[in-house]
Every structure is written in C-alpha cells, then in structure tokens.
Image (cartoon, rainbow, N blue to C red):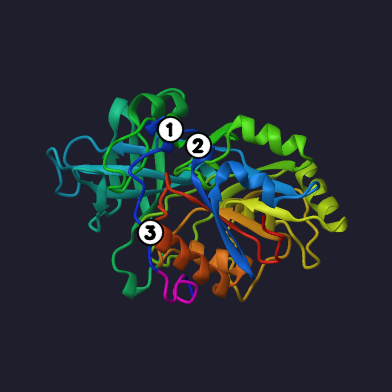
Amino acid sequence: MRGAGAAAGLVGLPAAAGPIEASGRRRDEARLLVADPSSVVDTTFGALGEFLDPGDVLVVNTSGTLPAALAVEGPAFGRGGPEGLLLHLGTELPGGLRLVELRAATGFGSAPFGDARPGTVRLPGGGRAQLLSPWPAAPAPAEGPARLWVARLDVPGDPLAWLADHGRPIRYGEPAEPWPIAAYQTVFATEPGSAEMPSAARGFTAELVTALVSAGVVVAPLLLHCGVSSPEAGEAPQPERYRVPAGTAALVNAARDGGRRVVAVGTTAVRALETVADETGTVHPGQGWTELVISPERGVRAVDALITGWHEPDASHLELIAAVAGSELIEKSYATAHALGYHGHEFGDFHLLLPGGHPLP
C-alpha cells in the first residue's frame, strides 16, 4: 500500500509556523488529540498522564537531531550561484557510508533535484561527499530519477564539530523562518545521529516526564537514527541504525506479561521495537541496521498504542500507523483534527492512538 490505503480520504493538515515556545508557551501546551474506537478527545500534551495507567511503558527514542543540511560549494551538475544546491545527510550505512540527498536551494528551503550523477561535490570547511551510486540501485521507472545516493563523506576533524560549524537543520519550505538546531531536539535526546527530528517526542518537557514517572508510568529508552523524509511520496523506509538495550526489552516484556500497555513515542520507536520482536511479541535486545517495513498486512507484535504527529496523506509513515491503529481510527482522527484546526509537520500538534480503548476523561 505504501501510504495509499492508509491515506484513503485523508486531508493533510497545515504546517505549524514554528515551535510553540516561540510564542512564549511550553512544549507540553501543544494540542493533543486522543482517539480510541469509541471517542475522540481534544486536549493538550500536558494532559497525557490522564490517558496512561501505572505500569504502562512509554518507549522513547534518544536520538538527537543533526544540523544535516549543507550548502554545496561552487557549481555542481550545472548548478551554481545563490540558488545552488544543498546536500542533506541521511542515515548512516555500514562501512562508513551514508545515504544523502541533493536538493535545489530555494528561498525558504529546498526542492527536489533530479540531475545528480556519480562524482564528488565540495562542502563547506573543506568537506567533500563522493556520490557512488543511486539508492535503491534500480529505482522503479515510475519513481523518476534517483532521489537518494550512497555517498562517502570526507570531512576534516571531528564530523560532529564540523557539522555544528557548517550545517543547519533540514527543512523543505515549512516553516518559512529558520530555527536553531536546539528547536529540533527532544528532551530525550542523548546521542546525535538523526537527519530529522524524532518529532513525536517534542511535546515532552522534563516536568511532564517527572510527573508521569511519579504516577507510575515507565519510560524505556531505545535508539533509532532517522533518515531524510522528503518527499514522503509513499516511498519505502530507508535502512536506519537502531539499538534496543536489554533493559528496555525487559521492561517491555514485563509490561506485556502484566497486562500493561506498550506505548511507542513515534514511528521510529515502533520500527526499532518491531525489528527485535519475535512472533510471540517477545522483545529481544539488539542493534544494527533495520530495513523492516511495517504495514497493516504485517501488523505489529509488541506495540499497543502510539504517540505520533500528523503526516501527509501520501507519507509511508501512515502504513506503520495503520498497522498499530487501523485505518478506520486514523480516518476518524484526521477528520476531527482537520475540523478543529490542528497543525502538522515537525513543529505541529500531536496524536495519541489507543486502538485497544481506554476510559477517556
């Protein structure tokens, strides 16, 4: 389905103009739509604890966001001047390689660029990226030119320090105003590595996490470094690097054995957990690169509920969300969110899906 079935009848939500804290409000004051099979509640993210029970496990992604957009220096592939090219650093691959995307710079962000070919592009501060081959190796003719490339990155000194000096957050035109990399970090971020923010956790504050833990909700960390998402036109997910610690596997398994819910914070947490869940739903520790594609046909084994943002109707993320919640619940939520004026994209509002039901306040 790759987005088509899950998106049947859905209407996309407008992008938020910027982070909520820019207007003087806390992140947990963002809106939250809570949906179960019987009802939908319009509330704020700070009320999340009202919909969770003691012993429920929140599985959170500790990946931090990189300033992964870099200006290409000098002309390349026939493009130069002020409206030149950007290189977006995507997911890390084995062997020190990376997936990257070349984009045409625009006034607010970037647009697709389909004329890349093998070769080397110059980056700021003496960096270089050698484009080796398209990814996937043989894209379907209907998908047009390859969007992503396997590349070898060569930068002076420490890569994270180099990125901090020369990179900026990835954006595609929304929001129109640039924001610093701090706006793209979640309260759980401890290890930089994501090309784009694991934004489902953006509504959490330290105070909210403390309140949840004090009420008996368990927070279990894992890691999945997100790749680039543009243009989300139903493409299969990229391989992404993940790590599920033994402690998190034990917490999830104990919750399931005790009849408590496993609530994934974001599609990234779902993908990592399901990668290491066996046919019985038992979660095992593991790490590496996952190429798992989660669809309604495949289903989920270890996840009971999901906190997520609002995705475009053609986003492949909706396949995974439908695997957790079912298309009917998603359609009801999106219709309600559209009617109530919710906002999407990385600084947008939030969505808690409880397909198993819950006594709503």
Q: Which x, y percent locates residue 73?
A: 22, 35
Q: Which x, y percent locates residue 211?
A: 70, 34
**Element marked by disc 2:** helix
Q: Nearer the viewer, residue 82 or 50?
A: 50
> Does label 1 or label 3 sit earlier along the sequence?
3
166 magenta-colored: no
**Between marks 1 and 3, how big is the CA–CA gap?**
20 Å
5 magenta-colored: yes
Crowdedness near tag 3: few (<14), some (14–19) or many (≥20) residues, C-alpha within 10 Å: many
Crowdedness near tag 2: few (<14), some (14–19) or many (≥20) residues, C-alpha within 10 Å: many
Q: Which residues are magenta?
A: 3-10
For the residue marked with disc 1, what is the amino acid? Glu
Quadrant of residue 354 within the rendered picture: bottom right
Q: Are marks 2 and 1 in contact (CB under 8 Å)?
A: yes
Q: Nearer the viewer, residue 298 or 71?
A: 298
Image quadrant containing the C terminus: bottom right
- Residue under label 3: 13
**Between marks 2 and 1, how big is the CA–CA gap?**
6 Å
- Residue under label 1: 21
Asked whether the viewer can see residue 93, the reply is: no
Q: Which x, y percent locates residue 26?
A: 49, 33
Q: Is residue 150 above or below residue 323?
A: above
**Between marks 3 and 2, how big is the CA–CA gap?**
19 Å
**Element marked by disc 3:** loop
- Residue under label 2: 27
